[in-house]
């Protein structure tokens, strides 16, 4: 049979290769979108991707047919053209479906390649069938088979490439993707042109569908439309990838931050509950255990017997607190040095631990002071037995490298409920210990009420404190906070002092707890607010605006009128609320977080700035801080003091600074006393310093003089203009 000789337009062939390659590139991109974790998004990409990719492959066929020239006019029937498009979309759906799966086993690859190959063949030969030729096309069997083989092989290659791309790292991904797309484009074109070579057109053939769909213009429109569609899809895909990438990075950084939070919290907890030198529980942990034991005792004591028995309340179980203080430790420390002192303390701690029962709590609560909590003892005699054992074990000689030392200890005992008030057990054991010391040491004493002189003294002080405000005995001292970067003053902290007629200047550490205990803190706190505002106004009149921080007590936090009081004081002195900063101790803030939130919320609405004080002493979770509208976090001076010697303190401070910055808080280090501490803090990115290195708390009139003078010894300088500025909180 004589056949028509077809010719190929080289530009058309190149165009078809480009379309096939572009469609493959987009397909590879889509395959990654389909694998996103979110099911809805993945499904949308699968459906949309199949439509776009199918259209791309199908239009490649059209473009390929445009390059194909016969001496007669060609056209396509509508129905079969449409069916061939469906076939192309179905092929794409299979391809994306297979590529989207987690693992590509050999079976999945074979099945996928067969299905895809069959689909491509179906698409191609349906497209050819849309050419309604008379007489019909004569097919060359081996070439048809070859085209089918190429289709399956191309599909297998395509799926492998999908998978291979997924394995690689992200570097130069688009380059590899382009290479893979070119391979796939070549394979698809190979199949197409092999299929075309298999078709023979008899010399007398005419195309019955010539008038229906056809012509160069239609082909061009289809090609352009599908390329545009592909381009749009690629753009969306890349955009989606960016968004997902950002979301993933964000999630990762949040996960990391949470991990750090957990670690820092753990470190804080350890630091807060254990004594750094001996590893024994510290006072805080001891007090918690004591509180828990008392609560258990109260519950057990309140319990009544079973039905049928005589229902007398049972006696609460007894417990004892033993206060152990070393005799003669100070001279050891002074004459042999701190290192020897530390060794002695560690050995003593180990011996004490060996002497107490497993159920007892042993804590180190001061330099050479230890506390023991004994539970479930049958009578005071048990506590005395333990006290004797402790004295005996501590008195045994201590062998150090070059010398043998001998110390002893005095033990004070209080037994509850026999002779102690639940909330004063430690103070009573302490008083008993002093009695033992006065008796010459190396002995024990049981608490008796006549030893409770401290309580009487407190009562006396409370009476005097009541009148202190009226007598004008209270005053505020101010301590600067210094900006770490510029060395300028960022504000001052107002610290309360009591000028006692006979005792001199009394520290707030002594009288604030008394004021809290005897209900005087409201009055004191109100005075502090008014006085701080008055002083700020006076400085403002002198042309200097300084932010002043005041300390709030837990009782003020729970008071109803605090916010109104602060508001009134600010108004009275014509001050802007942001000039006032309120500091609240961390443990207090976290103890009653609802009250803190309420008050902080009220003060925050006024515009007053808020700070968390003594951070690190309350071992609250850093995550909790997010719940408070605070601006500033002050790291407790116990951490700052340990910075130069303790790796643990350094890592805690470092973590706290980083996390605080993530939470948007300004970090102030308290108690900076040495240049070494300042330098470490500066390296860690601390924002502000407060401490004796820069200045001690001082009366208001000294502050301005101090601020205006240069301080070369601390590398800080102040100029009049910087003092006048109100820096960030
Ligand atoms: P705080 O708020 O943490 O104040 C910082 C304390 O650290 C002050 O002690 C300050 O003198 C001291 N300090 C500052 N720099 C250094 C340093 O470099 N080394 C050392 N060792 N100490 C430094 P202060 O004035 O004795 O006050 C003790 C605490 O009494 C304050 O701790 C605060 O909690 C409380 N307090 C002070 N004034 C008031 C007040 O008006 N109201 C209430 N409720 N509490 C107050
Ligand atoms: Mg403070
Ligand atoms: Mg503090």
Image: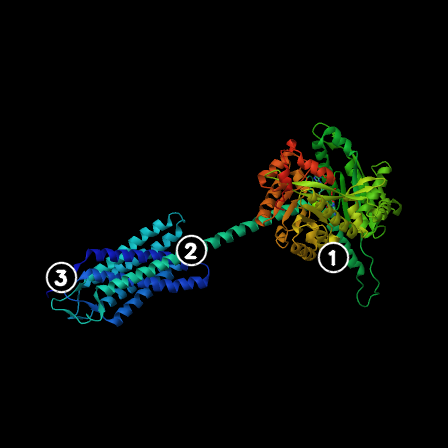
Q: CA distance from mark 3 to mark 1?
A: 101 Å
For the question of whether residue 160 can be seen, the reply is yes
Residue 725: % across, % down: 63, 43
What residue does disc 2 label?
241
Could you tell me how far apart the alpha carbons at marks 3 and 2 are, in whole angstroms?
48 Å
Residue 488 visible in the snapshot: no
Q: Secondary structure at mark 3?
A: loop
- Taking the spot 34% from the left edge, 52% from the top edge, the residue there is 177
Q: Name the one closer to the observer, 208 or 604.
A: 604
Q: Quadrant of ligand 1?
A: top right
Q: CA distance from mark 2 to mark 1?
A: 54 Å
Label 2 crowd bin: few (<14), some (14–19), many (20+), radius 10 Å = some
Provide the residue designation for mark 3.
5
Residue drawn 11% across and 68% down?
A: 204
Along the line of sight, which residue is nearer the eye, 656 or 661? 661
Q: Earlier in the sequence, mark 3 or mark 1?
A: 3
Which x, y percent locates residue 193?
22, 59
């Amino acid at each position: 049979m004589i056949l028509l000789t077809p010719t190929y337009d080289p530009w058309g062939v190149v165009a078809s290769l480009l379309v096939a390659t572009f469609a493959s590139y987009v397909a590879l991109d889509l395959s990654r979108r389909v694998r996103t974790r979110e099911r809805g998004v993945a499904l949308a990409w699968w459906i949309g991707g199949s439509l776009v990719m199918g259209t791309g492959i199908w239009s490649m066929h059209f473009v390929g047919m445009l390059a194909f020239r016969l001496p007669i006019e060609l056209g396509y029937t509508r129905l079969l053209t449409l069916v061939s498009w469906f076939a192309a979309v179905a092929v794409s759906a299979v391809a994306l479906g297979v590529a989207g799966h987690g693992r590509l086993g050999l079976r999945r690859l074979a099945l996928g390649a067969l299905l895809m190959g069959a689909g491509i063949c179906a698409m191609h030969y349906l497209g050819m069938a849309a050419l309604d030729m008379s007489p019909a096309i004569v097919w060359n069997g081996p070439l048809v088979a070859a085209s089918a083989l190429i289709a399956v092989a191309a599909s297998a290659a395509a799926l492998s490439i999908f998978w291979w791309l997924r394995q690689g790292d992200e570097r130069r991904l688009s380059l590899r993707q382009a290479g893979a797309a070119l391979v796939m484009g070549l394979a698809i074109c190979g199949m197409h042109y092999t299929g075309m070579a298999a078709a023979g057109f008899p010399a007398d053939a005419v195309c019955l569908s010539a008038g229906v769909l056809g012509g160069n213009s239609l082909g061009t429109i289809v090609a352009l439309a599908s390329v545009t569609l592909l381009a749009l899809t690629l753009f969306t895909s890349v955009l989606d990838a960016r968004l997902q990438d950002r979301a993933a990075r964000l999630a990762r950084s949040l996960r990391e931050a949470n991990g750090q939070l957990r670690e820092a919290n753990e470190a804080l907890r350890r630091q807060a509950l254990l004594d750094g030198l001996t590893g024994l529980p510290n006072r805080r942990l001891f007090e918690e255990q004591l509180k828990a034991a008392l609560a258990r005792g109260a519950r057990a004591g309140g319990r009544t017997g079973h039905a049928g028995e005589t229902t007398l309340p049972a006696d609460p179980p007894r417990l004892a607190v033993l206060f152990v203080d070393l005799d003669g430790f100070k001279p050891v420390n002074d004459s042999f040095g701190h290192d020897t002192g530390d060794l002695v303390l560690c050995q003593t701690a180990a011996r004490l631990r060996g002497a107490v029962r497993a159920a007892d709590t042993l804590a180190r609560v001061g330099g050479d002071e230890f506390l023991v909590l004994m539970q479930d003892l049958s009578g005071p005699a048990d506590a005395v037995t333990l006290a004797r054992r402790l004295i005996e074990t501590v008195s045994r000689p201590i062998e150090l490298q070059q010398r043998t030392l001998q110390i002893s200890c005095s033990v004070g005992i209080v037994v509850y409920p026999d002779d102690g008030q639940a909330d004063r057990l430690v103070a009573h054991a302490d008083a008993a210990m002093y009695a033992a010391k006065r008796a010459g040491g190396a002995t024990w004493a049981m608490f008796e009420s006549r030893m409770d002189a401290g309580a009487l003294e407190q009562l006396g002080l409370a009476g005097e404190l009541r009148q202190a405000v009226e007598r004008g005995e209270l005053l505020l001292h101010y301590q600067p906070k210094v900006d770490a970067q510029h060395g300028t003053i960022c504000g001052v902290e107002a610290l309360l002092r009591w000028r006692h007629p006979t005792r001199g200047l009394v520290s707030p550490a002594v009288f604030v707890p008394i004021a809290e205990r005897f209900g005087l803190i409201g009055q004191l706190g109100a005075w502090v607010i008014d006085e701080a505002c008055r002083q700020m106004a006076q400085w403002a009149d002198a042309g200097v605006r300084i932010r002043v921080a005041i300390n709030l007590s837990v009782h003020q936090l729970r008071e109803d009128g605090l916010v109104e009081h602060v508001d009134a004081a600010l108004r009275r002195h014509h001050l802007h609320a942001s000039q006032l900063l309120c500091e609240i101790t961390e443990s207090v803030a976290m103890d009653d977080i609802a009250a803190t939130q309420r008050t902080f919320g009220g003060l925050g609405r006024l515009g007053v700035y808020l700070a968390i004080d003594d951070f690190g002493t309350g071992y609250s979770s850093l995550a909790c801080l997010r719940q408070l509208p605070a601006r500033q976090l002050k790291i407790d001076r116990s951490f700052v003091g340990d910075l130069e010697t303790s790796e643990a303190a350094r890592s805690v401070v470092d973590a706290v600074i980083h996390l605080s910055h993530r939470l948007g808080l300004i970090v102030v280090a308290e108690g900076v006393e040495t240049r070494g501490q300042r330098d470490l803090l500066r390296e860690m990115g601390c924002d502000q310093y407060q401490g004796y290195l820069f200045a001690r708390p001082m009366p208001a009139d000294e502050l301005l003089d101090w601020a205006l003078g240069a301080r070369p010894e601390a590398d800080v300088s102040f100029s009049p203009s910087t003092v006048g500025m109100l820096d960030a909180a």
